Image (tube, rainbow, N blue to C red):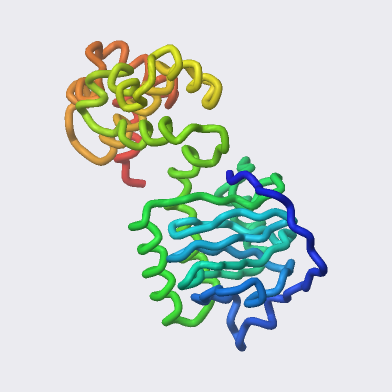
Amino acid sequence: MRKANKPIQQTGCNVFDLKHFLSKDEVFHIARVCINTRNDISYHSHNYAELFWVEKGIGTHHVNGNKVRIQADDIVLIRPEDRHTFSSSSKNGLTLVNIAFPASTLEIYRDRYFPTSNQYFWSKSILPFHITVPDKLIKRFSLKAEETMRFKRSYMQLDSLLLFILRNIQPLSTQQDYSNVPSWLISAIKNYNNTDCFMNGTSAFVELCDRNSDYVNRVTKDVFHETMTEFVNDIRIKHAADQLILTSIPIKQIAYSCGFESLAHFYRQFRIRYEQTPLEYRKLNLTIV
């Protein structure tokens, strides 16, 4: 989550109503906008939820009395109670894609998809959920939004678009929704994703961190509440689980490619995380019902 900079003084706040942005039979609003000054959009709250991502440019998100820098590849999820606006002093301004939708949608999504989540639209922090994603993912979001714009703005189109976005940011947010993780550790996590790394275990992870082992272990425990060994095993076991579902590679070969020389140790670690054996996990996820 982004840290807030120095609070700003607010002189007033408008309240926006979603129905004022909708045509007949529409249930959500979607637009691509360019922000050049603070006056392009007034400081406001609303009776709806929204999200936006930045396609290009650099600017400031004035939100809940704070200033937060935003730039290309950022995506922010706005709760109905948030108060915000934007500004940009860059030459070409700030280009956003914005989606506004009924607050009631959040209740449905919470019950069905995020019953225990304290992230995304259900975060209780002062600042709304804010994550930076790969550029190629932003391009996919924009293409999906452009496709959506060609259809009637119905609940079906809204769900298709929102779930596409949430489904793609969820795996990233488990790694990025923290403010106290140094960039070198985030980089190591992203790059610790291949057989060569897995075969070399924690030593490969330490090498990617470019720090000494004791320091990496200490920071990992502070951030993830796991030892470095436990954290690395989590990454390897998750990769193994994906391979069990997506391939027909023998379990012993999967275990070895993930850096587990002992099949018994692999089974033990897998059962800790998934409460079933790799064979049971594979059979369950390949069963047609």
Which is nearer the eye, 24 or 235?
235
Q: Of all residues shown, which one is farthest toward the bottom?
A: 24
Q: Relative to residue 184, is residue 117 drawn left or right?
A: right
Q: Is residue 220 left or right of residue 283?
A: right
**Residue that appears at 54% across and 69% down:** 98
Please give the name of the residue rendered at 21% of the width and 28% of the height, measured from the top-left corner: 195
Could you tell whether 287 is left or right of 8 in the image? Answer: left
Q: Nearer the viewer, residue 51 or 253?
A: 51
> Which residue is painted at 69% across and 45% down in the image?
125
| Whether residue 157 is visible | no
Q: Quadrant of residue 237?
A: top left
Q: Please state the total of marks drawn on the protein image.
A: 0
Q: x, y percentage for residue 288? A: 32, 45
**In the rendered view of the protein, which quadrant contains the N terminus?**
top right
Answer above or below: position of 287 versus 154.
Answer: above
The residue drawn where x is 79% and y is 69% is 13
Q: Measured along the vertical axis of the image, is residue 261 above or below residue 87?
A: above
28 above or below 70?
Answer: below
Residue 284 picture location, percent across and down:
35, 35
Viewer-closest of 112 and 121: 121
Q: Position of residue 168 (x, y in %)?
A: 42, 52
Residue 250, picture quadrant: top left
Picture coordinates of residue 46 (x, y %)? 73, 68
Q: Is residue 180 visible?
A: yes
